[in-house]
Amino acid sequence: MRQSTCTCWIWSVVVVMGAPAAALVEEPRGSEALHNGIRLLGPWPPRTAALSREPMKVPYLDAPPAVIPIDVGRQLFVDDFLIESASLKRAYHRAMYHPAAPLLKPDQPWEMTGRDPCAMVFSDGVWFDPQDKLFKMWYMGGIVRATCYATSKDGIHWHKPELDVVIRDGKRTNIVQEGFRDSVTVWLDLEEKDPNRRYKLFRSHRQEQQWGLSLYFSPDGIHFGEALASSGPCGDRTTVFYNPFRKVWVYSIRADARGLGRVRSYWENADALAGARWKRGEPLPWVGADKFDPERDDLKTPCQLYNLDCVAYESLLIGLFALWRGQPRDRAKPNELCIGYSRDGFHWHRPDHRPFIPVSENHGDWNWGNVQSAGGGCLVVGDQLYFYVSGRAGIKGSPASGVCTTGLAVLRRDGFASMDAGLTEGTLTTRPVIFRGKYLFVNVDAPQGELRVEVLDKDGRVIRAFTKDNCVPVRADRTLQAIRWQGANDLADVANKPVKFRFHLKNGRIYAFWVSPTQTGASHGYVGAGGPGFTGPTDTVGSP
C-alpha cells in the first residue's frame, strides 16, 4: 500500500474540520481544500501539455492527506487512498444486465423511422425525481433524433406520456425537443435555487459550420425554452456533469489528439450558463484511453475514448468511460463501458480495464453494438445501483445500428470493489481519519464468516473501549450494517480526533465503511441520480 509522504496535507484537515487551530496555521496560497482533505495546489484544472497513452498519474494516491476527513459519504475501497496496510485482497466487480433488459423499445411512429428505429439514451438522462416520486428518462427518439421523455414508478416498466409540446397529425407525442441532435445531457439540478432552471438540457448539435453545445432550462423537464447559451467548438459526443464537491459544472468535451484519436477536453464553471460559452482554445486536454485498454482480437485497433459521463456517488466521482474499439465492416461499433474513480474531480484512477458493462458478442441480442451510458450515471434503488445504458442490435453484415433500445445493468450498492478474506482471518487498517459523527457502519458480505472492528489512536495503539474482543461480531450480508462494542454506546469519545479503524475479517467481503451522525446510518454522501426514499442529492435517510 502507498504510504503518506507529505505532512503538509494536515493543513487541509485543520481547514475542513474548522478546528480552533486553523488560525495558527498558514494555508497554502492558491489552493482549494476538498471534503476529503485533498488540496488542489497550483493552477486548477491542471495544465497538460499533451495527452499520451500512459495511464493518468493520480497525485492524491502518491501523497494522500496525513489525516483524512470522512464526514461526507460512504468510504469505498476502490483504491489505496484510505488504506494504510492490509492483508485482505481487493476484488473489482462488474455490473450485470437486468433480465428485463431492454426496458425501453421504439414503438411510436416518430421512433420507427428508417432502418434504425431508436429509443435509446445517448447520455440524455435517467433520474429519480423526489418531488414527483417518479423515475424519469430522456432519450433519443427516431432517426430525426428528437429528445423524448418517459416515466416509471419502479424503474423497470416505462410509460411514454402524451405531452403538449409536439403535436403530430393531431396527436400528442412524448417529444420534449425537436431538431437534429447528437449527445444530449439532461441534469436534474436539486441544488438550483431558481425553480425555472431545475432541469438543464445540454444539446450537442451543428451550429453553422461547427458542432457546439446549447443550454436550455425547464421547470418540469418537459417544457424547455429557447437556448440561452451556445458554446465554442466541440466534438459531437460532448456531455456535461455537475461536480457537487466543488460546486462546478464540468463540460466533458469530445476532442481529437494526434496519435490518440478521440479524447476528452475539460472545461468548468460554477455557473452553467457562463460555462456553456467557452471560446475556441479555452478547454484543456484531460484524458483519453490508455495503453492498458485492450484491443479486440478481431480488430487490432488501439482504443479511443468515445465519451465520459460522470456523477458524484457517496464520497467520490464515478466515471463511465465509453471506449471505442474500432469500426467493423459487418457490425455496429462494439463500444462498451469501463469505469474509473476520481477523488479530486480531474485525475482518474482506472485499476480495472475490463468492461464494466460490455457489449454482447451474440448477434440477435439487443446490445450487440455500441453500449453507451446515461446522464446521471447511476441511481440508488434499495440495495442496488441501477445503470441505464443503450444498446444497438445491429444488422449483420453492415455497420448500421439496427434497432436501438435502452437497457439496465445492476450492481450491489457500493459494489465497485471489495476487500476480501478467506477462511484465514485478514485485516485492513485505515490511514488516520477524522469525523464528527458517532456511529460506525459497514457494507459487508459475511453471512458464513465474521467481521470485527477495533479503533486505534493516531499512533496505532488500540483504544481500550473499542477493542476487537469488545466488538460485537457481525455475521451478515447487508449493505448497511451497524458496528457496536460492548460497554460503548457510540464513537463520541473519539470524534474530532485522528483515529484509525482496523477491520478483522474472515470468510467475507467488505465494500465500504462510514461514520454517521445518526443511528439510521445516513451517510450524507451523494446518491448519483437519486432513488426512491431520498429527498435530495445526498443520503440524509439511511435506514428508516
Image (spheres, rainbow, N blue to C red):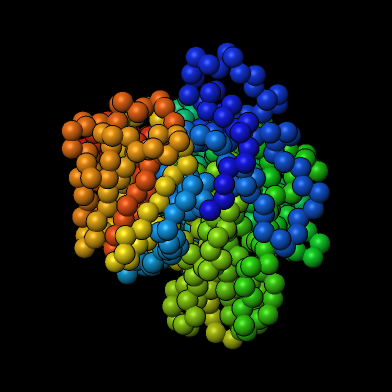
Give me the residue at 48% from left, 29% from top.
192
Give me the residue at 53% from left, 58% from top.
339
Query: On the image, which quarter does residue 529 sit in?
Result: top left
| Residue 101 placement (x, y as % from top left) | 37, 67
- Whether residue 331 is visible, yes or no, is yes
As rendered, which of 159 and 448 lies closer to the eye? 448
| Residue 477 placement (x, y as % from top left) | 24, 56
Q: Residue furthest bottom?
A: 397
Give me the residue at 56% from left, 37% from top.
65
| Residue 291 placement (x, y as % from top left) | 68, 67
Give me the residue at 58% from left, 62% from top.
322
Residue 306 sits above or below residue 436 on the image? below
As rendered, which of 85 and 435 lies closer to the eye? 85
Residue 470 sits above or below residue 197 on the image? below
Q: Quadrant of the C terminus?
A: top left
| Residue 361 placement (x, y as % from top left) | 49, 80
- Whether residue 131 is visible, yes or no, is no
As rendered, which of 30 and 430 lies closer to the eye? 430
Query: On the image, which quarter does residue 255 sit in?
Result: bottom right
Q: Is residue 374 left or right of residue 211?
A: left
Callout count: 0
